[in-house]
Amino acid sequence: MPDKKYVSIFLEGRKIKVPEGYTVIEALWDTGHDIKRGVGCLSGLCGACAIAYLEPGGKRVKFGLGCQTIVKEGMNITVMPFFPSRTAQYNISQMERPIEKLKEIYPELYMCQSCGFCSVACPEWINVSKVMSFLKSGEYEKATEMMLDCILCGLCASRCPRGIAPQIISLFVQRAVEKERPLPENLKRRLAELEDLKYEELWAEIFKLDENGLREFCEKARKEKD
């Protein structure tokens, strides 16, 4: 097996050698750094491992996810801590028209100056500043569609000079918009079946199956579906 090739990076100002081709998280683990806080799914979906980094020769700090960013020779990296954001308390299930409460629940939204710092920080390349503009103008459907890839990492909030947390505000709006949409008919039927305990006996039988029995059951169900 060929020897690993290494590159030198700077972790929060300290020079270390890490394996070439590794992600930031993999490289730090490989070199004995016991990183637990800020590590989640390792698939780029949860947003827990936000980092800031400067590439060699670069003049502008970039942002990304430690589980997705590949280390490069001379890269200067810092692992971002959890960034606290104001989260309003509400029970959306008890709100008749929740979207009408947006200004009351998150008044800071209307302090947004569209500076664009949030968009630069987003590791998912979402135009967060545009999302904020849509929210302020009441174009909620456009805003929620743009935020579908948001992973709630909070990097946008960490860059906002006004202390706004776009990821938290947009999450409320997504919930409010979805609450007012009618449920699809097939989902209504399935919910009614669950309420009537239609599958209770079937699930009881499934829970009794061993591993082989479960495989056979799934294979049979797959063939019946086809």
Image: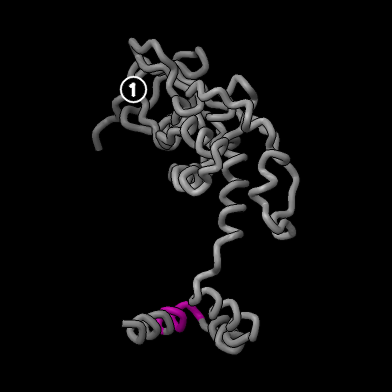
Instruction: Name the residue carrying label 1.
Output: 72
Q: In the image shown, does 124 or 27 lie closer to the viewer?
A: 124
- Could you tell me which secondary element the residue under label 1 belongs to? loop
How was this image coloured? one colour
**In the rendered picture of this protein, how many numbered marks are placed on residues?**
1
Q: Residues within 10 Å of mark 1 (few under 14, many from 20)?
A: many
Residue at coordinates 44% horizontally, 20% vertically from top-left?
53
Q: Quadrant of the C terminus?
A: bottom left
Q: Quadrant of the N terminus?
A: top left
Which secondary structure class fits the magenta region best? helix
The spot of residue 91 in percent (x, y) is: 74, 54
The spot of residue 161 in percent (x, y) is: 60, 19
What is the quadrant of residue 26 in the picture? top left
Q: In the image shown, does 152 or 136 lie closer to the viewer?
A: 136
Q: In the image shown, does 63 or 213 lie closer to the viewer?
A: 63
Looking at the image, residue 149 lies above or below residue 61: below
Residue at coordinates 54% horizontally, 69% vertically from top-left?
183
Q: Which residues are magenta?
A: 210-216
